[in-house]
Image (cartoon, rainbow, N blue to C red):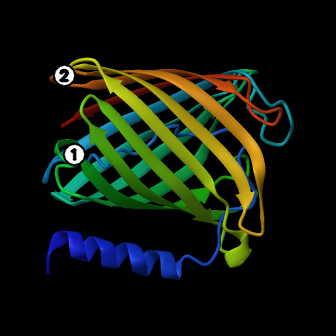
Amino acid sequence: MQPIRFTLQVIAASLTLSLAYISGAHAAADEIQVYDGGLADPGVFNLTWHNNYTISGDKTEPYPANHALNGVTEWAYGVNNWWEVGLYLPLYTINEGGGARMNGFKLRTLFATPNAADRKFFYGFGMELGRNAKSWSDDLITSEFRPIVGWHLGKVDVIFNPILGTNYKDGLGGLAFSPSTRVAYNASKNWAFALEEYASLGTLNDLHSETHQLYGVVDYAGESFELQAGLGFGLTDASDNTVFKLIFARDF
């Protein structure tokens, strides 16, 4: 069976089985990233270390984001040229008072067109299964379903992740829609500059604008590691006002 045909079948089956999405949203996220279809090379382990600090944000209990550092180490392994598996551990928060806590862990699988960076049009699909600490979410078990579509148009990249996920409680109408978009300009082999937008648009039963954040992002891709830094600004009253994110990645 062709790898791409198999990937499409997996995507279709996964969407069919996805009957619910998360209704209790986090005040902050451990991962702020638009997936671009990139995979670890077959047989290679990759570490992506996510950190984001809310400079000015929500102070509402029980999940205040203001002055909180959230992060996770994401461990990935390339199974073949179109499939990657991953583990998010540990997920952590260091809050305004200096206290630290563990937020749980997540398992991930990711399918994508082989060598997505070399294709004009590329696509993929990621799935996550998470077990959450009570201090992080009202829901013990949640999942995320992340389709990936994108285009490399010369020096410009356009990527869209129409994200859904689940707490396995609220039925099909409880599917929440949280799309993210990235438009990047690749100034050179090593440097790229991008705008990224992250939104929360409620559930399929009640689609409406909740949060929107716009990030200015700088990417560096070196020989031995990659680094991404971004500063995000809230565009609605419900959004965190200012968030700084930093992502470090390297192969082993």
What residue do we see at 21% from left, 69% from top? 4
Q: Residue at the far right: name it.
A: 60
Query: What's under tag 1, amino acid-wise?
Result: Phe
Pinpoint residue 119: horizontal percent, then vertical percent. 19, 48
Check contact, mark 2 vs mark 1: CB within 8 A.
no
75 versus 174 height, above or below:
above
Which residue carries the number 1 mark?
45
What residue do we see at 77% from left, 45% from top? 210
Taking the image as shown, residue 53 lies to the left or right of residue 218, namely right
3 versus 116 height, above or below:
below
Quadrant housing residue 48: top left
Between 94 and 215, the residue placed more toward the observer is 215
Q: Residues within 10 Å of mark 1 (few under 14, many from 20)?
A: some
Query: What's under tag 2, amino acid-wise?
Result: Lys
Pinpoint residue 145: horizontal percent, then vertical percent. 50, 62
Which residue carries the number 2 mark?
189
Residue 137 in view of the camera: no
Pinpoint residue 17: horizontal percent, then vertical percent. 51, 81
Pinpoint residue 60: horizontal percent, then vertical percent. 86, 36
Please tell me how many numbered marks the rendered image carries.
Answer: 2
Taking the image as shown, residue 90 lies to the left or right of residue 140, namely left
Residue 24 in view of the camera: yes
148 versus 2 height, above or below:
above
Q: Earlier in the sequence, mark 2 or mark 1?
A: 1
Tell me how far mark 2 sits from mark 1, CA to CA.
23 Å
